[in-house]
Protein backbone atom coordinates (compact mmCIF):
# COMPACT_ATOMS: atom_id res chain seq x y z
CA UNK A 1 0.00 0.00 0.00
CA UNK A 2 1.46 3.33 -1.00
CA UNK A 3 0.50 6.61 0.59
CA UNK A 4 -1.99 7.25 -2.21
CA UNK A 5 -3.69 3.89 -1.49
CA UNK A 6 -4.30 4.67 2.18
CA UNK A 7 -7.89 5.11 3.37
CA UNK A 8 -9.02 8.74 3.21
CA UNK A 9 -10.22 10.69 6.24
CA UNK A 10 -13.90 9.82 5.86
CA UNK A 11 -13.10 6.11 5.45
CA UNK A 12 -10.82 6.14 8.49
CA UNK A 13 -13.57 7.79 10.56
CA UNK A 14 -16.12 5.21 9.34
CA UNK A 15 -13.72 2.43 10.35
CA UNK A 16 -13.23 4.05 13.76
CA UNK A 17 -17.00 4.14 14.29
CA UNK A 18 -17.26 0.46 13.33
CA UNK A 19 -14.27 -0.54 15.47
CA UNK A 20 -15.53 1.35 18.53
CA UNK A 21 -19.06 -0.01 18.11
CA UNK A 22 -17.68 -3.58 17.92
CA UNK A 23 -15.30 -3.22 20.87
CA UNK A 24 -16.85 -0.66 23.22
CA UNK A 25 -20.49 -0.52 22.19
CA UNK A 26 -22.42 2.66 21.65
CA UNK A 27 -20.25 5.48 22.97
CA UNK A 28 -19.83 9.10 21.96
CA UNK A 29 -16.54 9.08 20.03
CA UNK A 30 -16.31 12.86 19.75
CA UNK A 31 -16.95 13.21 23.48
CA UNK A 32 -14.24 10.64 24.23
CA UNK A 33 -11.88 12.70 22.08
CA UNK A 34 -12.43 15.76 24.25
CA UNK A 35 -15.44 17.24 22.49
CA UNK A 36 -15.34 20.52 20.62
CA UNK A 37 -13.58 22.49 23.35
CA UNK A 38 -10.24 21.60 21.76
CA UNK A 39 -11.22 22.02 18.11
CA UNK A 40 -12.88 19.57 15.76
CA UNK A 41 -12.31 16.10 17.31
CA UNK A 42 -13.03 14.29 14.06
CA UNK A 43 -10.44 16.31 12.11
CA UNK A 44 -7.90 16.02 14.95
CA UNK A 45 -8.24 12.22 15.04
CA UNK A 46 -8.26 11.68 11.26
CA UNK A 47 -5.24 14.00 10.81
CA UNK A 48 -3.28 12.04 13.44
CA UNK A 49 -4.30 8.63 12.05
CA UNK A 50 -3.65 9.62 8.41
CA UNK A 51 -0.30 11.16 9.29
CA UNK A 52 0.80 8.05 11.18
CA UNK A 53 -0.14 5.67 8.37
CA UNK A 54 1.43 7.86 5.68
CA UNK A 55 4.70 8.07 7.64
CA UNK A 56 4.88 4.30 8.00
CA UNK A 57 3.95 3.69 4.34
CA UNK A 58 6.81 5.94 3.18
CA UNK A 59 9.32 3.53 4.76
CA UNK A 60 7.76 0.06 4.83
CA UNK A 61 5.07 -1.89 3.01
CA UNK A 62 1.64 -1.42 4.61
CA UNK A 63 -1.40 -3.62 4.04
CA UNK A 64 -4.85 -3.21 5.58
CA UNK A 65 -6.37 -6.39 7.05
CA UNK A 66 -9.43 -5.05 8.89
CA UNK A 67 -11.01 -1.92 10.34
CA UNK A 68 -8.04 0.24 11.40
CA UNK A 69 -5.81 -2.88 11.39
CA UNK A 70 -2.67 -2.92 9.26
CA UNK A 71 0.28 -5.23 8.66
CA UNK A 72 3.68 -3.56 8.31
CA UNK A 73 6.42 -5.05 6.15
CA UNK A 74 6.43 -7.66 3.42
CA UNK A 75 7.09 -10.47 5.91
CA UNK A 76 4.02 -9.45 7.93
CA UNK A 77 5.80 -9.60 11.28
CA UNK A 78 4.22 -6.44 12.70
CA UNK A 79 0.53 -5.66 13.06
CA UNK A 80 -0.87 -2.24 14.02
CA UNK A 81 -4.34 -1.56 15.44
CA UNK A 82 -5.48 2.06 15.69
CA UNK A 83 -7.99 3.03 18.37
CA UNK A 84 -9.70 6.16 19.68
CA UNK A 85 -6.62 7.53 21.39
CA UNK A 86 -4.07 4.74 21.32
CA UNK A 87 -2.16 2.55 18.89
CA UNK A 88 -1.36 -1.09 19.57
CA UNK A 89 1.63 -2.78 17.96
CA UNK A 90 1.84 -6.59 17.85
CA UNK A 91 5.14 -8.27 16.97
CA UNK A 92 6.81 -11.57 17.77
CA UNK A 93 4.09 -12.60 20.23
CA UNK A 94 4.48 -9.35 22.20
CA UNK A 95 2.32 -6.23 22.33
CA UNK A 96 2.98 -2.54 22.87
CA UNK A 97 0.62 0.38 23.25
CA UNK A 98 1.33 4.05 22.73
CA UNK A 99 -0.77 7.17 22.31
CA UNK A 100 -1.93 8.37 18.88
CA UNK A 101 -1.06 12.00 19.61
CA UNK A 102 2.69 11.46 20.25
CA UNK A 103 2.85 10.52 17.12
CA UNK A 104 3.36 6.74 17.00
CA UNK A 105 5.03 6.22 13.60
CA UNK A 106 8.51 6.15 15.20
CA UNK A 107 7.47 3.31 17.52
CA UNK A 108 5.78 1.34 14.72
CA UNK A 109 8.79 1.71 12.42
CA UNK A 110 11.11 0.69 15.24
CA UNK A 111 9.23 -2.57 15.79
CA UNK A 112 9.25 -3.20 12.04
CA UNK A 113 13.01 -2.60 12.02
CA UNK A 114 13.47 -4.99 14.96
CA UNK A 115 11.41 -7.67 13.18
CA UNK A 116 13.62 -7.14 10.11
CA UNK A 117 17.10 -6.86 11.66
CA UNK A 118 16.77 -8.16 15.24
CA UNK A 119 19.69 -7.34 17.52
CA UNK A 120 21.34 -5.23 14.81
CA UNK A 121 18.42 -2.83 15.28
CA UNK A 122 18.73 -2.97 19.07
CA UNK A 123 22.45 -2.16 18.87
CA UNK A 124 21.75 0.76 16.53
CA UNK A 125 19.10 2.15 18.90
CA UNK A 126 21.44 1.77 21.88
CA UNK A 127 24.19 3.63 20.01
CA UNK A 128 21.85 6.54 19.24
CA UNK A 129 19.74 6.86 22.38
CA UNK A 130 20.06 5.78 25.99
CA UNK A 131 17.13 3.65 27.11
CA UNK A 132 14.50 4.99 29.46
CA UNK A 133 13.90 3.43 32.83
CA UNK A 134 11.50 0.52 32.36
CA UNK A 135 9.43 -0.42 35.39
CA UNK A 136 7.27 -3.47 36.02
CA UNK A 137 3.73 -2.81 37.23
CA UNK A 138 2.00 -5.71 38.94
CA UNK A 139 -1.50 -4.28 38.61
CA UNK A 140 -3.40 -1.15 37.78
CA UNK A 141 -1.60 -0.41 34.55
CA UNK A 142 -3.25 1.79 31.95
CA UNK A 143 -3.52 -1.16 29.56
CA UNK A 144 -4.18 -4.64 31.04
CA UNK A 145 -1.50 -7.22 30.23
CA UNK A 146 1.10 -4.59 29.41
CA UNK A 147 3.09 -4.70 32.63
CA UNK A 148 6.29 -2.99 31.47
CA UNK A 149 6.27 0.80 31.24
CA UNK A 150 8.97 2.98 29.64
CA UNK A 151 8.83 6.00 31.91
CA UNK A 152 9.47 9.48 30.58
CA UNK A 153 10.08 11.94 33.43
CA UNK A 154 9.95 14.87 30.98
CA UNK A 155 6.58 13.90 29.51
CA UNK A 156 3.01 13.37 30.57
CA UNK A 157 1.64 9.80 30.74
CA UNK A 158 0.31 7.38 29.98
CA UNK A 159 3.71 6.16 28.87
CA UNK A 160 4.57 3.42 26.42
CA UNK A 161 3.43 0.11 27.88
CA UNK A 162 4.44 -3.32 26.60
CA UNK A 163 4.17 -6.99 27.41
CA UNK A 164 7.98 -7.31 27.62
CA UNK A 165 10.68 -5.05 29.04
CA UNK A 166 12.68 -5.22 25.78
CA UNK A 167 9.73 -4.04 23.71
CA UNK A 168 9.03 -1.22 26.17
CA UNK A 169 12.70 -0.19 26.02
CA UNK A 170 12.72 -0.11 22.19
CA UNK A 171 9.46 1.84 22.18
CA UNK A 172 10.80 4.43 24.59
CA UNK A 173 14.01 4.86 22.61
CA UNK A 174 12.07 5.19 19.35
CA UNK A 175 9.73 7.77 20.84
CA UNK A 176 12.71 9.74 22.18
CA UNK A 177 14.49 9.61 18.80
CA UNK A 178 11.32 10.70 17.02
CA UNK A 179 10.23 9.75 13.54
CA UNK A 180 13.15 11.48 11.80
CA UNK A 181 15.67 9.85 14.13
CA UNK A 182 14.21 6.39 13.57
CA UNK A 183 14.26 6.93 9.80
CA UNK A 184 17.93 7.95 9.99
CA UNK A 185 18.70 4.83 12.03
CA UNK A 186 16.96 2.66 9.41
CA UNK A 187 18.99 4.39 6.69
CA UNK A 188 22.21 3.69 8.62
CA UNK A 189 21.50 -0.05 8.58
CA UNK A 190 20.34 -0.08 4.95
CA UNK A 191 23.45 1.86 3.83
CA UNK A 192 25.72 -0.47 5.80
CA UNK A 193 24.08 -3.52 4.22
CA UNK A 194 24.38 -2.08 0.71
CA UNK A 195 28.08 -1.35 1.32
CA UNK A 196 28.68 -4.88 2.56
CA UNK A 197 26.92 -6.36 -0.48
CA UNK A 198 29.19 -4.44 -2.83
CA UNK A 199 32.35 -5.77 -1.15
Image (cartoon, rainbow, N blue to C red):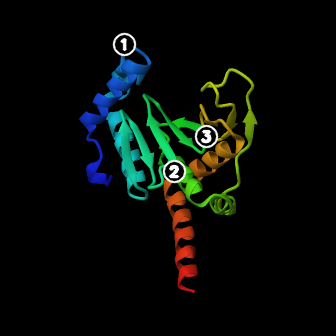
Picture coordinates of residue 132, whole percent (x, y):
70, 46
Marks 1 and 2 in Cβ contact (< 8 Å): no
Point out the image quarter for the C terminus.
bottom right
Q: CA distance from mark 2 to mark 3?
A: 20 Å
Q: Residue at x 74, y 36 (%)?
A: 135
Q: Is residue 84 left or right of residue 142?
A: left
Q: Residue at x 41, y 42 (%)?
A: 70
> Upstream in the sequence, badge 2 or badge 3?
3
Residue identifier under label 3: 93
Residue identifier under label 2: 106
Element type at mark 1? loop
Which one is in front, 198 or 47? Answer: 198
Element type at mark 2? helix
> Upstream in the sequence, badge 3 or badge 1?
1
The image quadrant that residue 129 belongs to is bottom right
Picture coordinates of residue 120, whole percent (x, y):
65, 63
The vertical placement of 121 against 76, above or below, is: below
Residue identifier under label 1: 26
Amino acid sequence: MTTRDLPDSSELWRQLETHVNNTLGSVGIEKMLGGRRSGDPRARWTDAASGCLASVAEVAALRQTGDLRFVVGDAGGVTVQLGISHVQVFAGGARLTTILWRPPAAVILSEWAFSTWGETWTSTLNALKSPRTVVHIDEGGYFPGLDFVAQDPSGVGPYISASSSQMAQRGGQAEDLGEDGVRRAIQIIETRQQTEQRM
